[in-house]
Amino acid sequence: MSELLDKVTESVNYLRGNGAFDVEIGMILGSGLGRVAEVVNTKAEIPYSKIPHFPVSTVEGHEGKLVFGELSGKKVAIMKGRFHYYEGYPLSEVVYPLRVLYKLGMKILIVTNAAGGTNPYFEAGDIMLILDHINLLPDNPLRGRNEEEFGPRFPSMAKAYDPDLINLARRCAEESGIHIKEGVYVALQGPSLETPAEYNFVRLIGGDAVGMSTVPEVIAAVHMGVRVVGFSIITNALRKSQTEGATHEEVVEIANVAGARLSSLILKIIEKL
Ligand code: HPA
């Protein structure tokens, strides 16, 4: 057995021994999305710090725990809090929890994040359905020996964001009267926010939003054949980011407000899955 598989098996055994069960859907909740976890019929809540081999979250405002429960009759696992490259972890560690969820049966991953808008038509508080991404992190979670039991050496990223789930998200948004934007998410390493020239650069290469997460998790999920749907909350609009600059406080505040809307949308999607 590979070293990774050994570790994942230990994590899975610990979780199963502490009330976790097999799940169909995994979710990563970024800032402001706490409401989704609130409506879950929770069966087990396990702090990351207790799970063997899990990295430990270091960001203020990001809780670190794994919640197992049921939503609309579906078994779900929610990552409350995630790991970022800027915290110092290699991306293979950032995606470790997803390896564990995969071994617990995850077939669908719903990812969310807070991001800066680089599309000039985006406003603070907008929700963007992620259609594609560009990885500008100086690492890839699949770097190093490939673990065949998780997926192939060279996985295709042509449909990283599942076309059927994208259409479902569009339908659910329309039915709920929730207006959503769509676009390409670009991941930069942070933790410094972008300079005006860097925001321009992201726009020029085809990015509609920029952030410091999500791309590693999506790459690992696609590697494992997990279907992905993702959303960004646009917490700062381009012009303001480039003049006054975004602040972390503002990002958290807007994420909380728009997060309530995105939570309803996600609940609707899960209902229809
Ligand atoms: N840049 C990078 N990450 C972010 C931003 C931003 O402007 N806003 C929220 N997360």
Image (cartoon, rainbow, N blue to C red):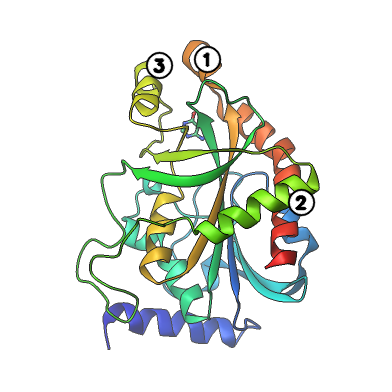
Amino acid beneath label 2: Ser
Query: Of the numbered discs in the image, which one, if any, rests on residue 196?
Result: 3
Sequence-first tag of 1 and 2: 1
Q: Is residue 182 left or right of residue 184?
A: right
Residue under numbered circle 1: 239
What residue appears at the point 54 percent right and 51 percent down from the top-left corner? Answer: 230
Query: Of the numbered discs in the image, which one, if any, rests on residue 264?
Result: 2
Amino acid beneath label 3: Pro
Which corner quadrant of the image does residue 37 belong to? bottom right
In contact (CB < 8 Å): disc 1 and disc 3 = no
Whole-percent x, y for residue 155 in the image: 29, 65
Rounded to the nearest angstrom, the CA distance separating label 2 from label 3 is 33 Å
Which corner quadrant of the image does residue 189 belong to? top left
What residue appears at the point 51 percent right and 55 percent down from the top-left corner? Answer: 82
For disc 3, the neighbor class at 10 Å (few under 14, some 14 to 19, many from 20) is some
Rounded to the nearest angstrom, the CA distance separating label 1 from label 3 is 9 Å
Cβ of mark 1 under 8 Å from ligand 1: the answer is no
Whole-percent x, y for residue 171 in the image: 69, 52
